[in-house]
Image (cartoon, rainbow, N blue to C red):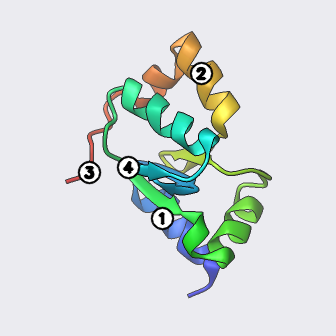
Amino acid sequence: MDVQQLIKEQVTGNPVVLYMKGTPKAPMCGFSATAVQILQANNLPLFFSVNVLEDQAIRDGVKKYGDWPTIPQLYVRGELVGGCDIMREMHESGELKKLLEGIAAPD
């Protein structure tokens, strides 16, 4: 499967997707750790995550897919929200909580 198609399936097949360095339980950079903390603070302790350090094609591909140059990247309901700084701003304003309303954690 083409990497762009795989990324499309990931972001459209899951209500919340975080492309990050490491995993939610073991983030490998401060920005990814902050992104996880922000999602958890918005009552979303579980979400679909992709460790870009495990696959260079996905790491490069997700930057092209969303036309966003950095990792982490948050997608909600198939749409790119942004990176850590945007997540932080949206969290502080309450906008992220509204965006995440009605999304249940995956089984």
Marks 4 and 2 in Cβ contact (< 8 Å):
no
Determine whether, in the image, residue 89 is placed left or right of residue 14.
Answer: right
Which amino acid, mark 2?
Answer: Met
Residue identifier under label 3: 106
Could you classify mark 3 by the number of other residues whose Cα lies within 10 Å: few (under 14), some (14-19), or many (20 or more)?
A: few
Mark 1 or mark 3: name the one nearer the start of the chain.
Answer: 1
Secondary structure beneath dot 3 equals loop
Q: Label 2's element?
A: helix
- What amino acid is labelled 3 in the image? Pro
Q: For the residue carrying disc 1, how many other residues have a C-alpha within 10 Å: few (<14), some (14-19), or many (20+)?
A: some
Q: Earlier in the sequence, mark 3 or mark 2?
A: 2
Using the numbered discs, state the Cα–Cα distance from disc 3 to disc 2 in whole angstroms. 23 Å
Give the x, y percent position of residue 52: 59, 65
Q: Earlier in the sequence, mark 4 or mark 3?
A: 4
Residue 88, compared with residue 13, is above or below; it is above
Residue 62: x and y in percent read 67, 63
How much space separates mark 4 and mark 3, taking CA atoms? 16 Å
Q: Label 2, on which residue?
A: 90
Q: Which residue is mark 1?
A: 10
In the rendered image, residue 57, in percent from the top left (x then y), is placed at: 67, 78
